[in-house]
């Protein structure tokens, strides 16, 4: 069998200059497309985060139905061994999630936001594994553990005048400088704009400058900064949704 080679001027290879031009054009197109792709990916992560918090809202209803309409403790302390049990489990290695009253009603994975990835922050406390990406509104719902005065009762759902506006969980993180170097940590607490301690913003606007939250009526939604609120830490997008505690952080 004879193979005939056709000499076609249109089949010649690209010159080096032409190849560089093609690479440059592709690079420009990718730089134009990349922000749109990043936005689409973040929107997908935000939707997954809201789905997590919807699950937390359903678990909240189940917990309250079996616990006299009460919210769960943010933290409990074993007086004998000093072990702290948060709503996400014990502050130990490994974390004992079965010790959490709240996690009996939900999966620990529902407490993890896909936009707040393990390795991007330093975990709080002594743990060496992911625990929570969401801060609990203990200031309002469990003031006893927030103020380390465990005689204070936890709030009950019937005491909330507008359940569709009060946060239970929201995207949270905290930035501080323990050893002359700023670090980003997850935050168990969702701090209010006005409280007894130094203002420490923990509401995390990690989803395209929005924060996901689940409310006392069980629904979830995303919020940006409202009138009077502000981003205090522009490096990590930390701030407060509003200027005052009411209606999102407190009922008073």
Image: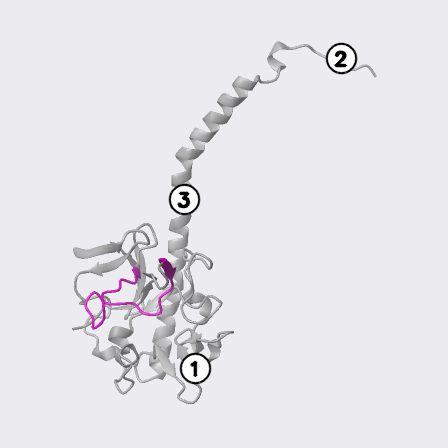
Q: Which of marks 3 and 1 is nearer the N terminus?
A: 3
Regarding residue 10, the answer to whether it shows in the image is yes
Asked if residue 198 lies in the magenta stretch, the reply is: yes
Q: Nearer the viewer, residue 186 or 157?
A: 186
Residue 163 in the image, given as x and y percentages of width and height: 24, 70
Label 1 sits on a secondary structure element that is loop
Q: Are marks 3 and 2 in contact (CB under 8 Å)?
A: no
- Residue 106 is drawn in which quadrant? bottom left
Name the residue tied to disc 3: 38
Q: Earlier in the sequence, mark 3 or mark 2?
A: 2
Q: What stretch is highlighted in magenta?
A: 181-203
User: Distance between the Cα atoms at labels 2 and 1?
Assistant: 83 Å
Majority secondary structure in the magenta region: loop
Residue 99 in the image, given as x and y percentages of width and height: 45, 80
How many neighbours does mark 2 have within 10 angstroms: few (below 14), some (14-19), or many (20 or more)? few
Residue 72 in the image, given as x and y percentages of width and height: 34, 79
> Relative to residue 27, is residue 57 depicted above or below?
below
Say which quadrant the N terminus sits in: top right
> How has the structure been colored for display?
one colour
- Residue 19 is drawn in which quadrant? top right
Name the residue tied to disc 2: 4
Q: Nearer the viewer, residue 26 or 213?
A: 26
Single out the mark in the foreground, 3 or 2: 3
Relative horizontal placement of residue 174, taking residue 22 as reference (left or right): left
* Residue at position x 31%, y 63% in the image: 213
Name the residue tied to disc 1: 83
Label 2 sits on a secondary structure element that is loop
> Relative to residue 238, is residue 83 depicted above or below?
below
State how many labels appear.
3
């Amino acid at each position: 069998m004879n193979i005939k080679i056709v000499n076609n001027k249109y089949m010649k290879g690209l010159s080096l200059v032409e190849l560089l031009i093609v690479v440059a054009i592709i690079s420009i197109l990718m730089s134009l497309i990349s922000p749109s792709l990043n936005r689409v990916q973040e929107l997908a992560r935000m939707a997954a985060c809201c789905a997590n918090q919807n699950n937390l809202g359903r678990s909240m209803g189940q917990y309250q139905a079996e616990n006299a309409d009460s919210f769960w403790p943010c933290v409990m302390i074993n007086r004998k061994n000093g072990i702290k049990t948060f709503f996400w489990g014990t502050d130990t290695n490994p974390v004992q999630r079965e010790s959490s009253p709240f996690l009996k009603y939900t999966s620990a994975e529902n407490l993890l936001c896909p936009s707040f990835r393990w390795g991007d922050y330093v975990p709080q406390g002594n743990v060496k594994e992911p625990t929570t990406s969401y801060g609990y509104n203990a200031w309002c719902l469990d003031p006893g553990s927030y103020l380390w005065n465990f005689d204070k009762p936890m709030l009950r759902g019937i005491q909330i005048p507008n359940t569709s506006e009060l946060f239970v969980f929201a995207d949270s993180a905290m930035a501080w400088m323990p050893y002359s170097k700023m670090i980003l940590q997850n935050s168990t607490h969702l701090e209010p704009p006005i409280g007894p301690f130094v203002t420490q913003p923990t509401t995390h606007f990690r989803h395209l400058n929005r924060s996901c939250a689940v409310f006392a009526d069980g629904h979830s939604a995303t919020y940006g900064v409202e009138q009077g609120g502000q981003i205090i830490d522009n490096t990590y997008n930390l701030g407060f949704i509003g200027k005052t505690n009411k209606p999102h952080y407190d009922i008073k």
